[in-house]
Image: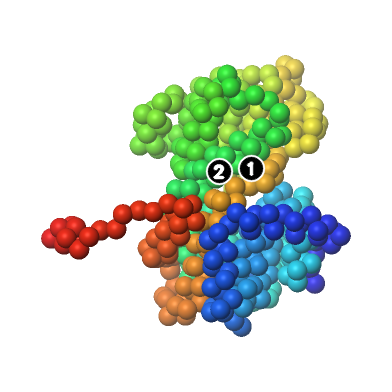
Amino acid sequence: MSEIKDISLYKSGIDKIDWVASYMPLLNAIKADFIKTQPFKGLKISMSIHLEAKTAYLATVLKAGGAEVFVTGCNPLSTQDDVAAGLAHLGFEVNAIHGVSDEDYERHLEKTLSFCPHLIIDDGGDFINLLHGKCRQYGKNLIGGCEETTTGIHRLKARKARGELDYTMMDVNDADCKHLFDNRYGTGQSTMDGIMNTTNLIIAGKTVVVGGYGWCGKGFAMRAKGMGAVVIVTEIDPVKALEAKMDGFTVMPMAKAAALGDLFVTLTGCCDVITAEHFDCMKDGVLLANSGHFDVEIDKKALCKKAVKVWERKPNITGYQMPDGRIINLLAEGRLVNLASGNGHPAEIMDMSFAIQAKCLEYLAKNGKNMPVDLYSVPQEIDRYVALEKLRACGDEIDVLTEKQEKYLNA
C-alpha cells in the first residue's frame, strides 16, 4: 500500500504529468513502441529518483511496457506530494512524502526495494548501497539497473574499485545525451530558476561564486554570466580551472572567494566545499545554495554552531545570524536548490535523459542476464538514437556520410 501525504492532491499531480508529457516527444514515441513490444512483461521495476512530474511520466512509460513499477524519491525535499498522489491514483505503489525525516526517507527506500525488483533506477546510489547492505535479500531477482547522476556514479566507481560491486549497473550519467545536456543546460537553468524564484532578487551586478566546473558548474556559470553577474569559479582540477579561465571566468580558491561573493552555488558532488573558515569572512546578506546531490557541500552543522540566531526568513530560506550581526542565508536547507525550491530540469531536457533510462532498461531486460557483473557505459547506439530522434522532434536534420566519405575515413 502506498505511503504518501494526501491522495486528494492527485488531480494537481496528474495535471502536471499531462503537461510535461506534451513536451517529451522521445518518451511519447518510446511509450508507443513499448505498448506494442512489452519489453518488461512480467518484470518489476523499482525507481528511486526525484519524484516530480517528469519522473512520474517515465514511470507511466515503463508501466506501458508491461512492468509493475514501484516509486520512491531520492531526496526528502525533492518529492512533490501532488505528483506522488497522482501516481498513486494511477495505480502505482508510491512511497514518498516531501520533507520526511532521514529515517522515514530510508524506510521508503527499503519498502520500495522489498518487492524484489528485476530492474532498478537509482539516483545518487542509495538503492545500491542498501542492496549491498541491510536490503541484500531484496536483490535476489535483480538483473541490473541504471544510475542517473554524477554522485551515484562516483559511488559506483568507488565500489567497483574496491571489488564490492555485486550487481550489473549502467552509467546513464556519462552518456553524451545525458551529461552534455541534462547536467549543463538542465542544471544551469533549473538551478537559476530555483534561486530566483526563492529569493526574488536580481542576478545582474552580483558576484556569483560557482563551486566546481564540471558539466553542472559550467551550465550554471554560463547562465549567471548571461544574466549579468560577475562570476568566480573555484576548482581542485587544474585542467577544469584553466578551462574556466579561458571561458572568461576568474578562478581562485574558495578561501579568497568567500569574502567577495554575493551568491555562492556548489555543484561538485563532494563534501565540505564551503566550511567554517569561509563563513567568517562572508558578506552580510550573502546567499548560499547547493545543486549537488547531497546536502554535504555546505557545512550546515558548522554554520548552525556559529550562529547566535537561526530562523526561517521566508519559505526555503533559513537565516543564520553571526555574532557580529552578519546574516548568512541558506537556501533549501543546503539540499538541491533546483528541486527543493523548484521544479527541476525542463521537460525537454529530461525527455533526453529519461529516454536513455527507458532504452537502457529495455537493453538490460533483453541482455542483462548474460552480462557479467560490472559498471557499463551506455551503448553508443542508444546515445545516437536519442540524439537523432531529438533532432527530428525539433524539426532539424543532419548530413549523412556518402559511401566515398566512409571509405575515406576508414582508409
Dot 1: element: helix
Using the image as rendered, state which of residue 331 and residue 186 is in the foreground: 186
Q: Which colour style is shown?
A: rainbow
Measuring 77% from the left and 50% from the top, which residue is drawn there?
Answer: 99
Q: Residue at x 66, y 28 (%)?
A: 287
Label 1 neighbour load within 10 Å: few <14, some 14-19, many 20+: many
> Is residue 320 shown above or below 175?
above
Q: Position of residue 276 (x, y in %)?
A: 62, 29
Residue at the (68%, 25%) spot, across then down:
201
Q: Position of 192 compared to 257: left or right?
A: right
What amino acid is found at the position of numbered circle 1 in the picture? Asn
Q: Is residue 304 left or right of residue 259?
A: right
Compared to 161, does 220 lie above or below? above
The image position of residue 88, as x and y in percent, is 77, 66
Residue holding disc 2 = 187
Residue underneath mark 1 = 338
Say above or below: 411 vs 341.
Answer: below
Q: Earlier in the sequence, mark 1 or mark 2?
A: 2
Which quadrant is the C terminus positioned in?
bottom left
- Residue 17, by quadrant, is bottom right
In the figure, residue 208 lies in which quadrant?
top right
Horizontal and vertical percent position of residue 216: 50, 42
Q: Residue furthest left?
A: 411
Q: Tell me if label 1 and label 2 are in contact, CB under 8 Å.
A: yes
| Numbered mark located on residue 125 in the image | none
Mark 2 falls on what kind of element?
helix
The answer to which image quadrant residue 114 occupies is bottom right
